[in-house]
Amino acid sequence: MRRREFIAALGVVTVGCPLATSQGAPGKIARIGIIDDSLIWDPFRQQLRELNYVEGQNIIYVYLRTDGSPAQLDAAAEALARVPVDVIIAFGTPRATKTIPIVAISISDPIGAGLVKNLGRPDGNVTGTTILGPDIVTKKLQILKDAFPTVSRVAYLWNPDNSATAAIFEDLRKAVPLFQMTLMSLEARTEVDFDRVFAQMSSDRPDAVLTTSDPIHQAHMPAIVDFLLKQHIAGLFQVRENVVAGGLMSYGVSLSELFRMGARYTDGILRGTKPADLPFAQPVTFEFVINLKTARAIGLEIPTTVIARADEVIE
């Protein structure tokens, strides 16, 4: 589908009150455009409620859904700009409009993605939260080695169209020899690629799989978790929610906290702060979560020393 056709086909859903008018409302009603709404957005809406935003009184949500690809994210942002909305919020990296403030949540590398030149002083209309952290790749590989000492074949499930996950792939490629591991590349750009990826894993049998927070992959995560469980393959995920859903382990920032921070940034923008004056929020702490039920199901005994290091253990 061509870009213009896609924009025309996008369905706009508003929640709170009719979009066309805010007549009769005691003051301005803010319109917030959300791209790819799902359960992971609940902390965002909850934080706004705690900041005294009430749907139908002083806020309206405008929802658009995409397949998570860069082209559709851009098209959705362009469509929301035409609605118009006051702020666009995305779990991804849209950049189609330079006029509407954008809060991008859980971006791996805003500089590498070309969103900004400086995290501390964004120079355009985009700000948000990043999952950047020092030595994240080597820390994940060390966790795998400690939890699963015999691991040698590690697969990385990533989206080559996502510049941030591509950067992580390069870091992994350089780091795996230090842990006496080899790296298998599992590329999935769209949903149709996952059947091929699952077939590749069934055939080549990695010892462990690393996943990302790429929006397309997160949307397909229930199938990924189910496949790894049935195949008895260890998975190291990026967000806690994937482990709660049945994944083995996760190491990364709190996704719910990133969405809450995104809500606080949205509040600031609605009060008049420019995105350029809101530094990209970088994580201070990382959480390590283990699902022991999944470990038992795939026949993996995780050492007690590793379990003791976990921030959360799901029994």
Image: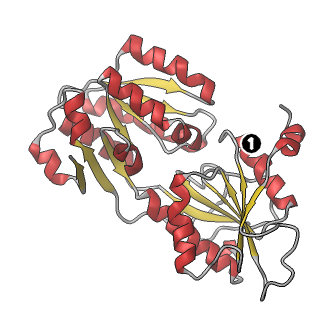
**Image location of residue 200, percent across then percent down:** 46, 15
Residue 185 or residue 204, whichever sits in front = 204
Is the N terminus in the top left, top right, bottom left or bottom right quadrant?
top right
Q: Residue furthest left?
A: 304
Vertical comparison of 146 with 261: above or below? above
Nearest the eye: 25 or 38:
25
Examine the rendered structure and indicate whether residue 157 appears above or below residue 262. above
Residue in the picture at 21% in, 41% down:
292
The x and y percentages for residue 243 are 35, 44
Report if residue 279 is visible in the image: no
Side of 32 relative to 146 (left or right)? right
Q: Quadrant of residue 124?
A: bottom right
Where does residue 36 sit, x and y in percent of width and height? Answer: 65, 50
In this figure, which colouring scheme has been used for the structure? secondary structure
Q: Nearer the viewer, residue 270 or 57?
A: 57
Can you identify the residue that label 1 sits on? 72
Up-down relation of residue 100 to residue 286 (above or below): below
Which of the 4 image quarters holds residue 187?
top right
Image quadrant where residue 163 sits: top right
Label tally = 1
Q: Give the residue furthest to the bottom.
A: 26
Which residue is the extreme one toward the top? 203
Mark 1: few, some, or many residues within 10 Å (few <14, many ≥20)? many
Residue type at mark 1 is Gln
* Residue at the spot 78% in from the left edge and 83% down from the top edge: 28
Nearest the camera: 292 or 112?
A: 292
Task: Look at the numbered disc 1 and give the secondary structure of its residue.
Answer: helix
Question: Residue at 61% across / 29% down in the picture?
Answer: 191
> Does the rendering let one see residue 117?
yes
Q: Which residue is at a point 86% across and 34% down the rendered structure image?
A: 2
On screen, residue 2 versus residue 192, left or right, reads right
Find residue 274 and report its horizontal and vertical position in percent: 70, 77
